Image: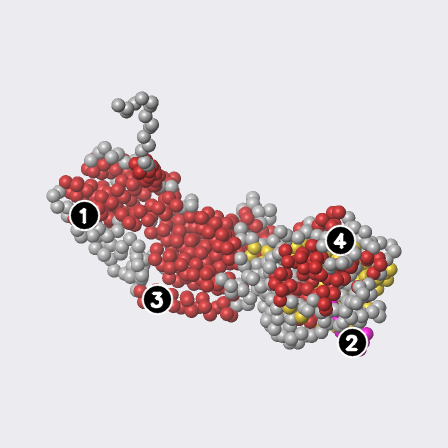
Amino acid sequence: MSGRTRMALCAAAATLMAACALLPLVSPVTWLLQAIFLLAIQTGVGMATRRVPLARPLTVAAQALTGLMLLTLTFANQQAIIGVLPGPEAFAHFGDLLQSGADDVSRYSIPAPLSDGIRLMLIGGVLIIGLAVDTLAVTFRSAAPAGLPLLALYSVAAGLSDGGADWLWFLVAAMGYLMLLLAEGRDRLSQWGRVFGGAPRTPDGEPAGAVAPVRTGRRIGVVALGIALAVPLALPSMNGGLLDAAGTGVGSGSGSGGTISAVNPLVSLRDSLNVDEDREVLSVKTNTSDLSNLYLRIVSLDDFDGTTWQPSKRNIEAVPDKFPTPFGLGPDVRRAEIETTVSAADWYAQNWLPMPYPPSGVDVDGRWRYEPLGMTVVGDRRQTTRGVTYSVRSLDVQPTAEQLAGAPEPPAALKREFTKLPDSLPAVVARTARQVTEGANSHYDQAVKLQEYFASAGGFQYDTNVKVGSGPQAIARFLRDKQGFCVHFSFAMAAMARSLDIPARVAVGFAPGTPQGDNSVSVGLRDAHAWPELYFEGVGWTRFEPTPTRGSVPSYTQSDIPGSTLPDVARPSQSTSAGPSATPSTSESCAGQKPELCASESPEAAIAAGGDGPRWYVLLAWVLGGAAALLIPLAPMLWRLRTRAVRLGGHGRTESEVSLHTLAVWQELTDTAWDFGIPPDDSQTPRKTAARIVRLGRLDPEAADSVHRVADAVEQVLYAPSPRPTAGLAEDVRRARSDLRSKAGWTTNLRAQLAPRSSARVVWTLTEWWTDIKRRAAAARPTLRRPSAPGQNQG
């Protein structure tokens, strides 16, 4: 393998190793496999064009065009000419995807969902960085500056990550960079560290001087390490979200100016509760005099997998003029229709429309769509609430305790879907639910007991400094520590209700705000809230309030439990002290996508993985799987590289070392000829074998002389009384290999590189090893004597 080919493979591997720092940012990480495949094609084009050879600018242009065509085939084949040639429509589609990806980066928490926009940014970024590294290290033969693109890739990943395993990805990226420098060591940095295979040599076999001084390599390394540690501190973290108080939409900030762009229903919920300045999010005017039930619901989370609560993906449609009657609401339940006008602040831009529940109609300008089951309205094509004023007609449903207590069993399909609990949920959750509700006569009684347990009787404390947490043990820790905020209370009550076969989900939005002198209600960041909704047949989805000192206790839960300690008055939202923020969660939205895509599925949102961080063993499994997928096909090539380096290394000084080195060089020569289609013939002498290689390989006179010199050295070692070292044998083999490669076709060269025939020696070695093991086992097995027949050996 030529030096440039080796450098190209090392450049691609270094790029992928640096790209591993992006793995914790997105879930799933299947994009890396696609990036490996596309980068391998782009690198192969560079290797081929350098073999022609083309001028350096043409080589770079060919690789760039290849990368663009690969991205077009992957992301914009329907808009491209014959599927691969990008035209105006394809570039416009790329622009839409990149804009969508930028929006997703600002709105999602770690790990973000793998949307098409984010996938294009990841894979496109890997190809661009791979091209830059290949151009610097291989095309222009300067590996040290190639660390700067690798540094940029790692720094972006480190700046967006939560810092949990940055040291691991730094080590992986640094190993890739060092591998690239060491691969160049023979030609460019022979004095930098340990050089594989010995120092470069002149055609006369004498060592050549170092081309690049070690001082330059060290300086570049120090600068790269310093930037790698400093740059991430200046980059924003991926903390933006629906309720985030940041003015820029990403990370935490003062909140002055800018735009918050996010759709996640639980992103930075605790941050919003802990802001120093309670900024107004919504201004509300309504015709009802009872403001205690004026909850503005954004979305409901109904899918619980033990780690996250998130909305199920459901069909969405055009916003109807009049919403249907809420599912499960019977005609005998008292209700009143109220009208509410909501004005969103011009800095508050998110995709879900906050509305009282259940809504019966909405008048809003812009591009909005409707999800029937959750009765939610979501923005289409980057439509947000920024500066929007809209009117909502909603129902003030007023069930009695008797109606709730006498509710029949819900439909089997609904009960099956909304009482699902994962097997990973700790048993303490269901056990505590049964203990708390012992003696209850109905699901309603159980629900009220659960609410009372969390709100007053259980000794729980409201504390926004507690991390959200994630994983199967999050609820168990909350039940043990008895400290948390609305997310903990609502999640725990919903999970415990499901364990009692009560359909349950979690709603996210805003608790009732603060009345103003102009008869409006100001809803601020600190009013951000989450609460459980339980289903009762004949009433529908019903709000409960387990969080102490927050919101208001529903009137239908206050009178039916004798001795209840719940207050009988509405409880306004209270301010909380500042504290560290919770890690945002992830969601997925139609925003930024084409209308036809938004017609099929509703957005998806999830709870943060903030408390426990990403599972290291999952990431390690993906990294190892990706490494195996890359290394297994390249195993024969890597084995030959290593074998060649060992055989052509230093020869030593003693007679035994000289003999071993000469025979190893001879075997490398015959294996090289075998790789190029000249199989070995052990029946011939070294001299005849050399003549056969020269004849079949059509070698030039200089290369032929090199082959014969190696054969003469072998005969001298085999037959001379005192073997003498012969200088330049390794260079003779390299010269012969170079001539064989130049005479062979491209298919033969490709096979010699990727699937060398001489790698069959590995199979032979393994076969001999296994045969030897079986022979040794048979020799060590004790011999059992057959018993004598009756009458024998007697006398």
Q: Residue at x 33, y 27 (%)?
A: 787
Q: In the current view of this chain or complex, which residue is farthest to the front?
A: 795
Tell me residue 631's x, y (percent): 42, 48
Mark 2 element type: loop
Residue 16: in magenta span: no
| Three-letter code, disc 4 | Pro
Mark in the foreground, 2 or 3: 2
| Three-letter code, disc 3 | Arg
Tell me residue 354's x, y (percent): 73, 63
| Three-letter code, disc 2 | Gln
Mark 1 element type: helix
Q: Earlier in the sequence, mark 3 or mark 4?
A: 3
In three-dimensional space, the C-alpha distance between marks 3 and 1, rounded to whole angstroms, equals: 39 Å
Q: Identify the residue position indicated by label 3 in the image.
A: 218
Q: In the displayed structure, does residue 384 sit left or right of residue 184?
A: right
**Residue in front for this viewpoint, 99 or 228:** 228
Q: Identify the residue position indicated by label 4 in the image.
A: 372
Number of other residues with Cα within 10 Å of mark 2, as a class: few under 14, some 14 to 19, many 20 or more: few
Number of other residues with Cα within 10 Å of mark 4, as a class: few under 14, some 14 to 19, many 20 or more: many
Mark in the foreground, 3 or 4: 4
